[in-house]
Structures are given as C-alpha cells and as structure tokens.
Image: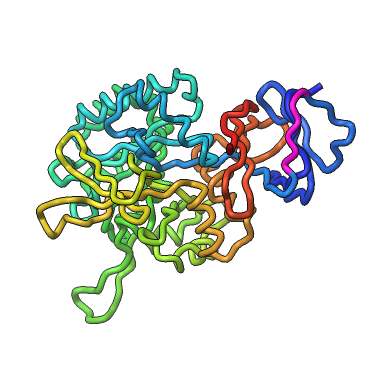
Amino acid sequence: MWDRLLYGGRVITENGVLPRGYVAIHGGRIVSLGEDWSTVEAKDCFDVSGFIVSPGFIDMHTHGIFDVDFVEGDTESIASGLSHYLSFGVTRVVASTISRPLPETVEQIRQLRQVKESRYGRILHGVHLEGPWLSPRCRGGHPLRYLRVPSKEDVAFVLGEVGDVLVTVTFAPELPNAVWLTETLACRGIIPVIGHTEASYEQAEQVIRAGARHVTHMYDGTLGYRENPNEALVMLPGVETAVLFYDTVSIELIGCPVHVPPPFFGFIHKVKPRGKKVLVTDSLVGAGMPEGTILTYRDGRKVRVTQNVIRMIDDDPAIDGNLTGSGVTMNVALRRLKEFAGIPLEEAVAWGTINPASVLGIDKEVGSIAVGKQADLVVIDDDFHVQYTFLAGSLVFHKS
C-alpha cells in the first residue's frame, strides 16, 4: 500500500499529459502513474478531478515574498517564512541577493546556508549572487555605491567563504576580468550568468564561450542594440543577439508585463530551444502585500508596493519610482505567460518546472512528474490557483 494517491485530474507528466490520470507516492517519491487507478491502494487518497497535477514550481530568481527577506532577514525569520512559497505552488527557490558591501553579502549568505537546515530548508536550493559585479548604467535597483569590478581578491573572498552555497552568479560581461570570472565560476560548478549589462556582442560572446549559460531577467537591465556611432541609423548587435544566437544559453523572463512587455514572451518561446526558457518572479520582500505598502531597508532606502511591482521612493526624481523588483507570485507569472505567449498550459508550466530544473542541474530529482523523482507536486486549476502543494510527498498546503 502506497502513502498517497492523487487521482482523477489532468496530470502533466514527463512524457505527455494524462487527461484523467493518477500519481502514487511512497517514501517521498513518485512510485507509479497512469490512467487506471482502480487497483491502486494508498493510505491517503485525494480526488483531484477537474484540476491539474503539475510538478512543483521552481523560482530560480527571488529576493523574498511577504515578510521573507533573503537580502536582510535573519535565519529564523527566513526559515519560518519559507512556507509562504508553498501557498503559491513553489517547492524550490534560489535565494537572490542584492548589491551591498561584500562582507555584509557574505554574512547574509552564511545565514541562508543555515536556513537549509530548517524544517522547510529543502525548499532553498541555494543562493544567486546578484551584484555587485554589474554595469552602473544598468544597475536598476542596485545602489551605485556598492557596485564593484570583479577583482581576483574579492572573488577569492566570496568563493572561499560561501562558494559551497552559491549556484548562480550574475555579472556584466563588459567589466574587467569578466572572462576570468566566468571560467573561475564554471570550474567551481557555479553557473555564470549574464545580466545588468550593456555589453557589446563581442563581449557577451567571449563570456558565453568561456562558460556563461544563462541570462538574468532578459529585457530588464539588459541593453540589446545600439546605433553605430560611425554610421547613422545602422544598428550594432549586442547582448540580445549573442544570447539568441547561442542555443547553449538559457533566458529568464520576469512574469510581469511591467518588467517585460507581453510580446517578448511569445518571441522568446518561438526563438529559444525547448528547455532554454525560464520564468522567474524576481520578487522582493513585500510581494503579495497590499497595494501601497511601504517598506524601509536597513540602509534607509524605501520602496512601495504598486500594482504588483516594487518601486523606489527617493527624493531624487531620477530614481523615485524606478523599478527595483516585482511583486508577482509564481502561479500568477505562469498564468500570464500562458496568456501572453498564447501557449498551452503544459508548455507554460515547463518554463517554471523542468526548464529551471535543467538549468540548475537538478532535473534528475525534480522538475517533472516521472517515476522515481521526488514527489514535489502542485494541484492547480486552469487559472493557476493553487489547491494543494506536496513537498517530498507530504501535504504542506491546502486551500481552505
């Protein structure tokens, strides 16, 4: 007798969609799936007729949600708040940092390392270092005073202290030492990521050839083309051309029409290979909070929740109102992707499940519904409203 049985719903499996199928779970893993559950016995049975059984969502770029703050929160508050992600169907996250003094960033990552030992620590796959090695012009919500060039001393310090918990590092390819940084990260098994950049085609190509294989929130903080200074109205290729040309590079988009105009979703779906398109939230602490909520960071910076995005509050009119991150949740982001790209639900789901799992190298364990994989599952309706979330086979969220 198995531990749990989900039956009657539309099951998005690794090999196709079962219009009316079942998933059996035992010992935290998927042990059987198919269309005839008449002889399947389980201790707990869930009739999910009319709903969709999907792999748990994976958000590989999030800074926080509600009061969970990966950037400034302490170990206890982050550990206790991770369960918020489960209510939106997210069963794995990569916690993202923001540009701050490097010793402070390293200390924060140490705290995140401790979170992995907590009750819901398995949700936290690792850390994404976003900043300080970014282009000043394309910094977005990253404070200019904290940006740096990736010196060998700084890189050695970061990798020596917290390299074991880093899974992705975003940097601008045009900075000095960018190719060396790419090779250094790749040798450590850390994914080198292009982002917050105005690099030329040639600069982007150099780091791609050196091992860069992902792009942080494309079309947000990445300048793609520029006019040739020597030829009026002649455009020069840039980052966009390079990352679209090389099929080895995956691209992430924020599931928010403010950060990414809707036509880009269908465009990337069409031009990038299967498995190389990823949806993220880039959510900050405050995501999911009521409209107009004002939050103050430790360094005095203030932000406001406005129409599902987080915007800066500043006396400088050049900064006031700038986007710093999104307030979107993963299930809403996937619903928007389906709508904007005009694709079937199961294709949209792949952007938030097996695709990020493949990029992160954890697709043999999670990211799809297949026998032997960990039973990280979410039950949703056609509008991506979450009904149940299962983490390693345990029911961790149930819509009341």
Q: Is residue 342 above or below residue 372?
A: below
Q: Is residue 194 in view? A: no
- On the image, the x and y values in percent for residue 41 come to 83, 27
- Tell me if 1 is positioned left or right of 293 in this view: right
| Residue at the limit of the structure toward the bottom, as seen here | 232
- Residue extent of the magenta highlight: 43-48
**Which quadrant of the structure image shows residue 262?**
bottom left
Q: Is residue 285 in view? A: yes
| Residue at the limit of the structure toward the front, as seen here | 400
- On the image, the x and y values in percent for residue 119 come to 49, 20
Q: Is residue 318 above or below residue 72?
A: below
- Residue at 76% x, 31% y is 45
Q: Is residue 3 above or below residue 316?
A: above
Asked whether 49 or 191 is in front, the reply is: 49
Question: Is residue 297 found inside the magenta-colored segment of the image?
Answer: no
- On the image, the x and y values in percent for residue 303 come to 23, 47
Q: Main secondary structure of the magenta part?
A: strand
- Residue at 24% x, 74% y is 228
Asked whether 153 or 315 is in front, the reply is: 315
**Which quadrant of the structure image shows residue 168?**
top left
Quarter of the C terminus within the rendering: top right
- On the image, the x and y values in percent for residue 241 come to 39, 64
- Residue at 55% x, 46% y is 355
